[in-house]
């Protein structure tokens, strides 16, 4: 399959997953909050029509701005609307292929629209932003990402012979760092250089929205795409900017959340189930712990619970 980087084949499930999103944002030691995020557990209100075989579409995204907050805010405001306009509808064949094209076209248009707006300002805006977007179409997760924000899935595999369930952390995104061979080659072919692990010695990521002054140096806005079918063994997805992953490995972050979900008693809160209270606490504590561990960067964490 050359359309996507597919993750392991799941066991089949019946029914659609129930998804709920929780978010925590910390400014860290930065003067300004340059992250942005979007949670749309049910995106159908944005879509004029769905493909015949699709029941529900959900969208979660985190954007980590640099050089200012304008690119991240622009992407948070516009990307899902562009996606809605391009999303396949009607009785279509090969929905997977159409969703892939829709995501690629959406990222391209969002970047072009921001660059046009940025270049029309006096002085021109130089903001840029990473993006990690999770689109869930029924039980299929599509992840499109630029830069070094990440998405990971917590899967508890079926019980082994000893009765223990095995924890698996699946990477749903691919980081874009200028030191990576393919990224560096593209930058150098475009006439750019990589110094001290950065494009022209300045920019830490090799793909992003905005960053108009680096686009001629091989920095692109084409996302990597991955897809993964959700299963009854899946517990949650973490989307977060690199501020979290500077002080947590993916496995550590997943285990940290699991520990909070499995703690004893929880404080009841009006209007929330016990599970919702636990997920909310896990999301907030994960972001706070990243700051406590010394992450000076902005930290934004989206935690998406998965239930069948």
Image (tube, grey):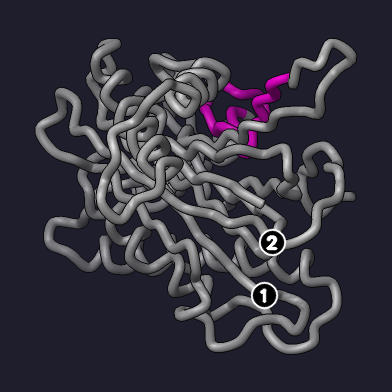
The residue wearing badge 2 is 16
Residue 237 is situated, as x and y percent measured from the top left of the image, at 55, 40
Identify the mark at residue 55; answer none if there is no mark: 1
Q: Which residues are magenta?
A: 166-184
Nearer-N-terminus badge (1/2): 2
- Asked if disc 1 and disc 2 are in contact, CB closer than 8 Å, the reply is yes
Q: Is residue 72 above or below residue 177?
A: below
Viewer-proximal residue, 152 or 64? 152
Does the rendering let one see residue 282? yes
Q: Is residue 212 above or below residue 298?
A: below
Is residue 178 a member of the stretch shown in magenta? yes
Viewer-proximal residue, 152 or 210? 152
Viewer-proximal residue, 192 or 257? 257
Classify residue 279 by image quadrant: top left
Answer few, some or many: residues within 10 Å of disc 1's Cα (few below 14, many 20 plus, some between 14 and 19). few
Q: Residue at x 54, y 63 (%)?
A: 58
């Amino acid at each position: 399959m050359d359309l996507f980087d597919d993750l392991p084949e799941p066991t089949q499930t019946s029914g659609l997953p129930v998804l709920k999103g929780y978010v925590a944002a910390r400014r860290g030691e930065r003067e300004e909050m340059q992250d942005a995020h979007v949670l749309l557990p049910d995106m159908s209100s944005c879509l004029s029509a769905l493909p015949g075989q699709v029941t529900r579409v959900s969208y979660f995204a985190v954007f980590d701005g640099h050089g200012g907050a304008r690119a991240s805010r622009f992407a948070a405001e516009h990307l899902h609307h562009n996606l809605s306009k391009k999303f396949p509808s009607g009785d279509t064949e090969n929905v997977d292929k159409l969703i892939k094209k829709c995501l690629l076209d959406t990222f391209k248009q969002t970047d072009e629209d921001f660059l046009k707006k940025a270049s029309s300002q006096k002085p021109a805006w130089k903001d840029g932003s990473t993006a990690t977007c999770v689109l869930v179409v029924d039980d299929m997760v599509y992840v499109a990402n630029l830069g070094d924000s990440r998405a990971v899935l917590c899967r508890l595999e079926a019980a082994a012979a000893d009765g223990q369930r095995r924890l698996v952390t699946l990477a749903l995104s691919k980081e874009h760092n200028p030191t990576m061979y393919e990224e560096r080659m593209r930058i150098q072919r475009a006439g750019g250089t990589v110094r001290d692990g950065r494009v022209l010695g300045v920019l830490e990521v090799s793909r992003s929205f905005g960053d108009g002054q680096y686009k001629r140096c091989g920095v692109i806005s084409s996302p990597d795409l991955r897809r993964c079918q959700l299963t009854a063994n899946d517990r949650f997805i973490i989307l977060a900017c690199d501020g979290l992953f500077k002080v947590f490995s993916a496995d550590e972050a997943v285990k940290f959340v699991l520990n909070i979900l499995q703690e004893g008693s929880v404080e009841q809160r009006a209007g929330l189930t016990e599970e919702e209270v636990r997920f909310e606490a896990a999301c907030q504590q994960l972001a706070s712990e990243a700051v406590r561990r010394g992450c000076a960067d902005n930290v934004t964490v989206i935690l998406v619970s998965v239930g069948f």
